[in-house]
Amino acid sequence: MKKNYKYILWDIDDTLIDFKSSEKQAIKSCFKDFGVTLTDEDIEIYSNINHNYWELLAKQKIEKETMLNQRFEDFIQYLSLENLDCKTINTLYQERLGDYAILFKDAFELCTKFKSNKKQYAVTNGTVIAQNKKLNKTGLRELLDEVFISDEVGYQKPDIRFFQHVFHEIPDFNPEKAIMIGDSLSSDMLGANNAKIDCCWFNPNGNLNKDKAIQINYEIKELKELLKIIE
């Protein structure tokens, strides 16, 4: 049954934007600048390193600045490259992520459709530089009412304080009329649970929810399925 949600909270990476594809192009481009050609296996190794660090961040087991640099320090060690600086690579990578932003199928069309009668907000743990470039390049920014980036908010999803800030900034916000849409169980879905709003898990790969403590209202494999959920 459809529900008349008024406020849509969108995660960005791996929800609206195909982060895997963007990541692959961005990381190849960065290392190419330093004369290093990465293989698909290398990129998969980096992707796994990166994912694990973001999970640690969501669980508040690492500081963000440390995480952003440490992932590249680990990757550089894996590549046995001693002459590259992880901070330099990370700074360049943030820029390139925005340059290579690729939308998921139906993302732009859905945001365009919902703009007519919904309030839409991006809520993201990504960096300010990367996320702003992505939203501008893809045209999503003009479809969103506001963008909340954890670096600017001061807290990360799933911290309740992140969502409290978001709710405070949205005029006449009603949590019963809000839905969080995202791919991450540990930040998006748990964050929605903490904030006591409905959530929709975007799960295109059919992953299992192994943490039964996390409650999910809806699960979709394609974004267009939201048309069966949101009135």
Image (cartoon, grey):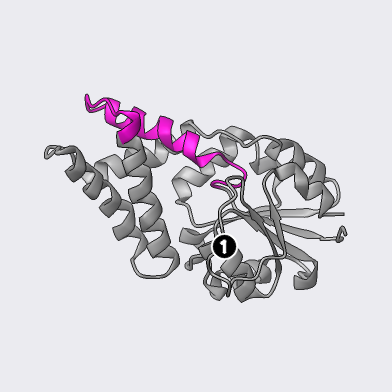
- The residue drawn where x is 35% and y is 28% is 29
Rendered view: 23 above or below 189:
above
- The residue drawn where x is 60% and y is 64% is 189
Locate residue 32, reporting x and y percent: 28, 25
Start and end of the magenta stretch? 13-41
Tell whether 179 sits left or right of 129. right
All told, the count of numbered labels is 1
- The residue drawn where x is 30% and y is 35% is 42
Direction left: furthest residue: 82
Picture quarter with the N terminus: bottom right
Occupied quadrant, residue 58: bottom left
Magenta-colored stretch includes residue 94: no
Locate residue 71, reporting x and y percent: 29, 51
Tell me which amino acid carries mark 1. Asn
- The residue drawn where x is 82% and y is 61% is 5
Rendered view: 19 above or below 214:
above
Crowd rating for badge 1 (residues with CA inside 10 Å; few <14, some 14–19, many 20+): few
* Residue 133 seen in the current view: yes
Locate residue 207, reporting x and y percent: 56, 53
Identify the residue position indicated by label 1 in the image: 209
Rendered view: 209 above or below 226:
below
Magenta-colored stretch includes residue 15: yes
Picture quarter with the C terminus: bottom right
* Residue 91 seen in the current view: no
Locate residue 199, reporting x and y percent: 69, 63
Tell whether 67 sits left or right of 220. left
Tell whether 44 sits left or right of 188. left
SS of the residue under disc 1:
loop
Occupied quadrant, residue 33: top left
